Image: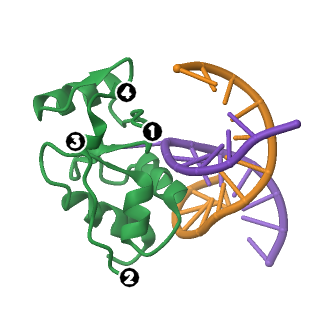
Chain colours: A green, B purple, C orange
Amino acid sequence: MKNFNDKCYQALRLIPKGKVTSYKEIARYLGSRAYRAVGNAMSKNKNAPEIPCHRVVCSDGKLGGYAFGLKKKIQLLSKEGILVKNGKILNLKNKFHTFKRLKK
DNA sequence: TATTTGACCAAGA
DNA sequence: ATCTTGGCCAAAT
């Protein structure tokens, strides 16, 4: 772990199964407001197979994107009990995961 | 070094 | 509810 991207990937591992979080939440966990850079890091996709990046969605409950296609992302999520309708997470408030902040 | 680019977010003439 | 706009930050070009 040395660059911002790797920190993001590390944060992804902390998301428990059956929950989702937002790009912004990850950035805040890292003590930064670079939520946009987080998404950027995913799209660069240095290690898509290693890290389950399908548990990350937009703050408003929309999906965002996925390296292997949104359909795949939806399937993976539903397999974990998270339902998606019209590209939006259902019952988001219930499934949302917040990290404990490193800095406050 | 400078510019461009996003899997974003919040607010709203 | 949907669309537009401006701002945001790190990485890639």
Mark 1 in CB contact with mark 2 (< 8 angstroms): no
Tell me which amino acid carries mark 4.
Lys
Which of the two labelled residues, at mark 3 and mark 1, occupies the earlier sequence position?
Answer: 1
Q: Which of A96 and A68 is in front in this view?
A: A96
Q: Which residue is drawn at 38% across and 78% down?
A: A2
Q: Which of A38 and A100 is in front in this view?
A: A100
Q: In the picture, residue A92 is in which quadrant?
A: top left
Mark 3 in CB contact with mark 1 (< 8 angstroms): no
The residue indicated by pointer 1 is: A60
Which of the two labelled residues, at mark 2 and mark 3, occupies the earlier sequence position?
Answer: 3
Element under label 4?
strand
Q: Residue A73, position in %: x, y?
A: 28, 31
Are the residues under badges 1 and 2 in a single subunit? yes
Tell me which amino acid carries mark 2.
Lys
Mark 4 in CB contact with mark 1 (< 8 angstroms): yes
Mark 4 in CB contact with mark 2 (< 8 angstroms): no
Question: Which quadrant, please, contains the C terminus of chain A?
Answer: bottom left
Q: In the picture, residue A29 is in which quadrant?
A: bottom left
Element under label 1?
loop
The residue indicated by pointer 4 is: A88
The residue indicated by pointer 3 is: A94
Q: Is residue A96 above or below residue C8?
A: above
Are the residues under badges 2 and 3 in a single subunit? yes
